[in-house]
Amino acid sequence: MLTGCSSKAKEPGDLKWFNSEEKAIAYGLQDEEIKENDVLEMLDLNGERFVVYKFKVPEGEGINVVQIAKKNKKYSWYTIANRIIVKSKQGKLDANVEIESKKGQQFKLYTGVVKDPEKSDELIEKEGITPIIDQEAGLYYAIKSLK
């Protein structure tokens, strides 16, 4: 099955820093060309802040995660993974990707298309993780620390 990636990864020197988390998020939403209601969750893992969002591009739909980096009381939208398209005209797939935070911590993002809302994906179930389901898009995700 074909999978696709769609993103413009940035080098750490390319980051734009803001005086507030809200301004960094507003910038990131505009930069990623997504709306505020595309944000599925803001979560804190191991002392780091992440934003999980869904997206639609001509190639298909998917879920991605970015970090809100903090340094010297400034905040930045930090792209830590390319977008993963899990639903397209070519088909549907489940994916799991290892990602690394700006501080070097390792996480795994699980995402895919919901097959049966009553059952969890087998791989996630084996990992002991409960996925979060976006009913509107029919997509799920989960993030696990690899610490």
Image (spheres, grey):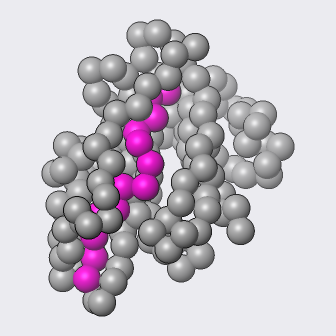
Is any part of residue 57 visible from this angle? yes
Q: What is the magenta range?
A: 74-86
Report which quarter residue 8 is drawn in. Answer: top left
Residue at the (28%, 89%) spot, across then down = 73
Residue 126 at what x, y percent from top left?
83, 43
Report which quarter residue 20 is drawn in. Answer: bottom left
Quadrant assignment for the C terminus: bottom right
Quadrant assignment for the N terminus: top right
Residue at the (73%, 42%) spot, across then down = 124
Q: How many marks can you see? A: 0
Furthest-right residue in this view: 126
Image height of 47 relative to 15, above or below: below
Is any part of residue 43 visible from this angle? no
Is residue 60 magenta-colored? no
Question: Camera-side residue: 108 or 11?
Answer: 11
Q: Does residue 38 appear to the left or right of 2 in the view shown?
A: left
Question: Camera-side residue: 19 or 71?
Answer: 71
Question: Camera-side residue: 110 or 136?
Answer: 110
Residue at the (37%, 22%) spot, across then down = 60
Residue 88 at what x, y percent from top left?
42, 17
Q: Does residue 74 appear to the left or right of 125 in the view shown?
A: left
Residue 21 at what x, y percent from top left?
27, 75
Residue at the (34%, 33%) spot, across then down = 6
Furthest-bottom residue in this view: 72
Residue 125 at what x, y percent from top left?
79, 42
